[in-house]
Image: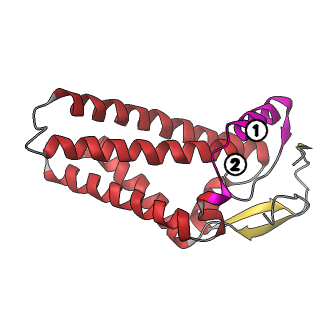
């Protein structure tokens, strides 16, 4: 796809359904659970553990939905692509844009990063509750490092969503709330 120069705000647009209800419910439930465990619950209490198990269940359900779900929810719609991410960065630097109906290449890498990181957090957290690994230091160290990485990733994700919304003139958070993105009519990626 060839990038097009930044368009004028008067560019014709149409609301296009992108995110299905499962993806949106997954996203916002995950946000709430992660925030609760990172900011509110005590790691020593069972509520923290139950929320952690819920997060792992959500991620496993999302992985399944990524295989059988709707078009833009499927991993095949946003395969990890380092070359695509480099191309997207190049477009950003050059002041050009390419609107993606679903996840952009950089967004896709972030999704894969967060899925893997949340699974590491869940696995290491579970290990700390077992008789075999209770009191063993490395699962706790791994858990803390993964939580820190997830927090940094979440901040980067939120910043990128904000900046890309401004750059592309598309309200990306609205899309994750309503399921619809207001996409340029003439963009060739809209139907993909």
Q: Is residue 86 above or below residue 112?
A: above
With 189 as the anchor, is 181 left or right in this view?
left
User: Where's residue 182, x and y in %?
Assistant: 76, 62
Q: Is residue 143 above or below residue 100?
A: above
Say few, some or many: other residues with alpha carbon within 10 Å of mark 1 (under 14 / 14 to 19 / 20 or more): some
Secondary element under disc 1, as helix, strand or loop, is helix
Type of secondary structure dominating the magenta stretch: helix
Name the colour scheme.
secondary structure
Say few, some or many: other residues with alpha carbon within 10 Å of mark 2 (under 14 / 14 to 19 / 20 or more): many
Residue in the foreground of this view, choosing between 156 and 72: 72
Q: Is residue 1 above or below residue 65?
A: above
Callout 1 touching callout 2 (CB < 8 Å):
yes
User: Where's residue 121, x and y in %?
Assistant: 32, 42
Q: Is residue 75 above or below residue 163?
A: below
Residue that mark 1 sits on: 88
Secondary element under disc 2, as helix, strand or loop, is loop
User: Where's residue 34, x and y in %?
Assistant: 36, 49
Q: Disc number at residue 61?
A: none
> Magenta region: which residues?
76-97
Q: Residue at x 35, y 42 (%)?
A: 120
């Amino acid at each position: 796809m060839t990038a097009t120069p930044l368009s004028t705000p008067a560019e014709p647009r149409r609301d296009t359904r992108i995110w299905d209800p499962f993806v949106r419910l997954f996203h916002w439930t995950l946000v709430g659970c992660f925030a609760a465990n990172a900011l509110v619950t005590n790691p020593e209490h069972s509520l923290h553990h139950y929320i952690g198990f819920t997060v792992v269940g959500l991620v496993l359900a999302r992985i399944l939905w990524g295989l059988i779900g709707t078009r833009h929810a499927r991993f095949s719609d946003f395969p990890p692509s380092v070359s695509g991410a480099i191309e997207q960065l190049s477009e950003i630097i050059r002041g050009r844009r390419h609107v993606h109906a679903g996840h952009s290449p950089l967004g896709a890498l972030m999704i894969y990063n967060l899925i893997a990181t949340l699974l590491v957090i869940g696995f290491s957290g579970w290990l700390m509750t077992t008789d075999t690994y209770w009191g063993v230091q490395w699962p706790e160290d791994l858990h803390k490092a993964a939580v820190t990485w997830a927090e940094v990733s979440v901040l980067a994700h939120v910043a990128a969503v904000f900046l890309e919304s401004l750059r592309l003139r598309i309200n990306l958070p609205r899309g994750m709330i309503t399921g619809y993105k207001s996409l340029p009519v003439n963009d060739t990626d809209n139907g993909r």
